[in-house]
Amino acid sequence: MKRIGQVRLSGRLVGAIEEDGDKTMFTYSPDWLSQPDAVPVSLTLPLRSEPYVSQGLHPFFENLLPEGWLLDVTSKKLKISKNDPFGLLLATCHDCVGAVEIEAVTTVQS
């Protein structure tokens, strides 16, 4: 099963993050890369057309997730396992602290 989210920066679409098995891939949108005012979502994810592939979530996205007691409460309330960081990302980061927003798009059978 592949899960996908749109990544926005201050409301503007900058790319997509997708999960396929135990890997995640973040890719900047070609439209975003062509903008003269395009900036990266993080210093650890500089602008480039090639996707960023990682085992599990890239640390930047991992750091958007709740921690400690808030993770416990969030996991219980949303009925999403603490061992499902991608699911938590899609469920909680449509309104993250800061400029980054992640909106669940779809679930695709692979």
Image: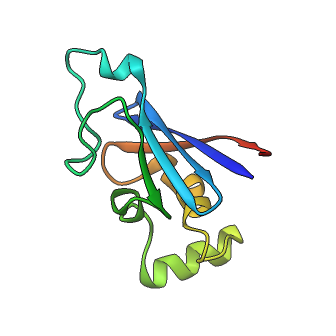
Q: Residue at x 35, y 63 (%)?
A: 59
Q: Residue at x 41, y 52 (%)?
A: 96
Question: Where, by quadrant of the figure, is residue 37 drawn?
Answer: top left
Label total for image: 0
| Rendering coords of residue 95 (x, y %) | 46, 48
Q: Is residue 103 above or below residue 68?
A: above
Q: Residue at x 44, y 70 (%)?
A: 66
Residue closer to the observer: 32 or 69? 32
Q: Is residue 37 left or right of residue 17?
A: left
| Rendering coords of residue 36 (x, y %) | 20, 15
Residue closer to the observer: 39 or 77? 39
**On the rendered image, what quadrant is the C terminus found in?**
top right
| Rendering coords of residue 65 (x, y %) | 44, 65
| Rendering coords of residue 60 (x, y %) | 33, 58
Q: Is residue 95 above or below residue 48?
A: below
Q: Is residue 2 left or right of residue 34?
A: right
| Colour scheme | rainbow
Q: Residue at x 52, y 53 (%)?
A: 24
Q: Is residue 95 above or below residue 92?
A: above
Q: Is residue 74 above or below residue 20?
A: below
Question: Where, by quadrant of the figure, is residue 15 drawn?
Answer: top left
Q: Is residue 52 left or right of residue 38?
A: right
